[in-house]
Amino acid sequence: MTDEATVFVPGHVTGFFTVHRDDDPTASGSQGAGVTLADGVSVTVERADDRRVELNGQPASVDAVETVLDTLDAEAAVVAETDLPIGSGFGISGAMALGAALAANSVYERELSRNELVTIAHGADVRAGTGLGDVVAQAAGGMPIRLEPGGPHHNEIDAVPCRPRVEYVTFGELDTGEVIGGDTDLLSKAGTEALSRLVSEPTPEQFAYASRRFARESGLLTDHLREVIQDVSEAGGEASMAMLGETVFALGSGLSDAGYDPEACRVDAAGARLV
Amino acid sequence: MTDEATVFVPGHVTGFFTVHRDDDPTASGSQGAGVTLADGVSVTVERADDRRVELNGQPASVDAVETVLDTLDAEAAVVAETDLPIGSGFGISGAMALGAALAANSVYERELSRNELVTIAHGADVRAGTGLGDVVAQAAGGMPIRLEPGGPHHNEIDAVPCRPRVEYVTFGELDTGEVIGGDTDLLSKAGTEALSRLVSEPTPEQFAYASRRFARESGLLTDHLREVIQDVSEAGGEASMAMLGETVFALGSGLSDAGYDPEACRVDAAGARLV
């Protein structure tokens, strides 16, 4: 018996992705690849009489978290803290849903397995329209390659076996739901090509290259981000756009070398875990 | 380009298991469950002209490591350090094989994926007769449940979503090869029952209970370990035997409470990773 539990969930920057819709949200999702970050979200679940969700000290309305708490029958207080930029492509919604699932399972002794909890959080994120692959990536840690879409009972995950330094700069917010809710054929075609490229050479450099081509070919790259990525290339580095945010990420010291003032951290080693 | 790389691999204590043999060593393996430990093995691979394998400063002959280096075409020096007891059920052979695979891939830029490297190390451990499930568990971290046997292309893994403290005491060595090379029908029957028990209630307490029943029913429990486990039970704790070693592990403070002087650490969060 415990009255609270805290879970750390890494941030997740998607480099490229495809869109797969299914009537079952836990079978929906995306193929693709990304980096999980040692910078992430700390999610604490406390037993409470009235449900309450907070992000950085402010009341927050996060549909995926509500679905998780409904599913686990937990009238909990969920208190999340993060230094990551919000609404900018770091998978904060997925992190909050996954953290809430793992922590509530512990506090309320729901006796679910890790895969079951990841499935619940993934389905909730998909249903809310806030993510297609963040949750399964955040559960895995590292540089996950999502070979097949969906939650743990459907998907297949490999990884780039490296943990480079990652830099990132955010210039504003983008609405994930608007992009993944629209016509995604072009995007999925570019995502499939990027995946095939990375699978044939699972290195950080190839990940950055495949991501950059995807950002351009999917039509998602904004003019401003294109310039920043170009600056990094000219300084000899590797950068691309975080899907889906007004954010550029680079491997190593790419953004610093190009004269930007980025946040920096290493690729996360562990994935979501009770702390 | 790098001249050396270091990988940390958690120790792995198997609570219960089944035995599955296949002509392909990467499809061979075991179902079962265990705990990975924050205590583990640090494996450094250095570029070298002559192959050399060391464990705690002494030359070591580890067949699984040789197979990994052959497969990756790496005439490397492999230097492993650990505080864990050797030959006592902590999966040191698997840890050295997995660490060598991940580190050699990095040093020699072999551009293999994480699953491919885990597959190579798992197959090498199986071929050497030193492990059936340690490598895939050590790659996963946490409290992995191996639902299906084999390497990443064959198996299916879930986990107990908790990270309790683990205590352990070792009284001597057991020969893994001798046990898993013999008649294993009784053992696999007990392992299948234990797995079914844990899947229906994936909690640390159920893991300890299922492991204890398995140790008894498989016929692997020695008289001495039976007494130690009994002592822990009488002190109100949960303990079982580490497969396959003359080792007792307990959750929480079970061994301390029973008056033993155990080593203690927490369940590992991450699985094998470049440090």
Image: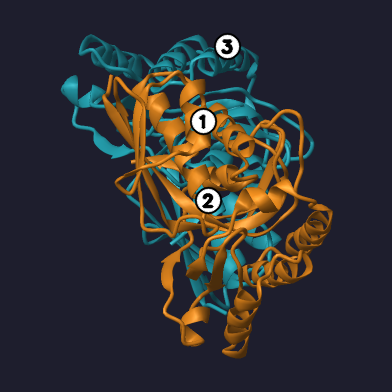
Chain colours: A cyan, B orange
> From mark 3 to mark 1, how far is it between C-alphas?
20 Å
Q: Amino acid at mark 1?
A: Arg
In this picture, residue A155 sits left or right of residue B249: right
Look at the picture and state if A197 lies above or below A161. Answer: above
Q: Nearer the viewer, residue A200 or A57?
A: A200
* Closer-to-camera residue (A13/B35): B35
Q: Position of residue B238 (x, y in %)?
A: 61, 77
Residue drawn at point x = 40 percent, y = 34 percent: A173
The residue singled out by tag 2 in the image is B91
Q: Is residue B35 visible?
A: yes
Crowd class of label 3 (few under 14; some 14 to 19; many from 20; radius 10 Å)? some
Residue B67 at what x, y percent from top left? 52, 28
Cα separation, mark 2 vs mark 3, equals 39 Å
Where in the figure is residue A52, as x and y percent of width and height? 52, 66
Q: Residue at x 49, y 68 (%)?
A: B170
- The residue that mark 3 highlights is A193
Query: The N terminus of chain A is located in which quarter?
Result: bottom right
Kindly check if marks 1 and 2 are in contact, taking CB atoms under 8 A apart as contact: no
- Residue B189, placed above or below residue B219: above
